[in-house]
Image (cartoon, rainbow, N blue to C red):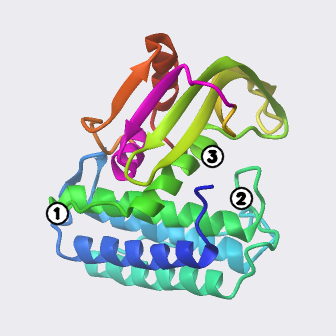
Amino acid sequence: MTRLSFEQYLDHLRRESRRFRDVLADCDPGAKVPACPDWDAADLLWHLAEVQWFWSSIIVGRPAGPDALEEPARPTSYDGLLADFDTYSAALVSALESADPTEVAWSWAPEQTVGFTFRRQAHEALVHRLDAEQTAGVVTALDPALATDGVAETLGVMFGGCPDWGTFTPDQQHLRVDCTDTDTSIWVQLGQFTGTDPDDGVAYDEPDLAVVPDPGGQPDAVVAGPAGVLDAWLWRRDDGAGVTTDGDPATYARFRALVDNPIN
């Protein structure tokens, strides 16, 4: 229900990338990034440049994966970083403009389509735009529609999402996340993830969550707030002062323990 059209994702990718670049162009290259204290503004600029280079390469080379890719060299000057960002960002937009979202393309997630990159990279640009603004001290609001989809994407893909080699076993606890400014609710069911990763042999047996359709009835707990606040809070870019909770404290505590972790 929260999904945007692919053209909307592409438009957001353009606008958030441009805002990211404009903010950092006027920023002290050595300014520290609040959400990523090991990074400065130059590191943040290069990070998103590399990310956009990577995904443009994936889309152009689809359906091949990343094994044969060779990472670009990082420029030694800030002007060089800005120039490379311009090149790689334009390449990603161009690759998506000419691609069919339904085509097969590699991703690290269960969804293996070009459409995954449309959505994921719109949100990647949004979150790092916020990083850039926090670094420069010029924070502006997140777009409510994109942020609402961001809440769903963060819960359903970044924290949830079950690979084909694993099993999610749900229990009876449900939590509802309400985006109060867009009148949108996202339901989460808590449970346990088990499985062994075939790539590295690591076995998992740990608490997990899944985004689910409205199951009917009342949730055990509710988390509510404006979409932009919730999205930033889930990404650990906001202290959650605008987030409210209601219902069973134990259910909320389980949920909070799951989402109170860095997203890598």
Of residues 78 and 16, the one drawn nearer to the viewer in this rendering = 16
SS at circle 3:
helix
Rounded to the nearest angstrom, the CA distance separating label 3 from label 2 is 12 Å
Q: Which mark is residue 138?
A: 1
Label 1 vs 3, first from the N-terminus: 1
Residue 166: where, in percent of width, then height? Answer: 81, 31
Split into 4 quadrants, where in the image is the N terminus?
bottom right
Q: Quadrant of residue 14?
A: bottom left
Give the residue displayed 52% in from the left and 71% down from the top. 52
Q: Is residue 260 visible?
A: no
Residue 261: where, in percent of width, then height? Answer: 46, 32
Q: Which residue is disc 3 drawn over? A: 157
Residue 258: where, in percent of width, then height? Answer: 52, 26
Identify residue type, mark 3.
Val
Q: Is residue 108 above or below residue 170?
A: below
Q: Is residue 123 above or below residue 249?
A: below
Q: Are marks 1 and 2 in contact (CB under 8 Å)?
A: no
Q: Which mark is residue 107?
A: 2
Identify residue type, mark 1.
Val
Of residues 122 and 230, the one drawn nearer to the viewer in this rendering = 230
Identify residue type, mark 2.
Ser
Along the horizontal axis of the image, is 87 left or right of 169? left
Rounded to the nearest angstrom, the CA distance separating label 1 from label 3 is 29 Å
Q: Residues within 10 Å of mark 3 (few under 14, many from 20)?
A: some
Write down the region rendered in magenta: 216-235
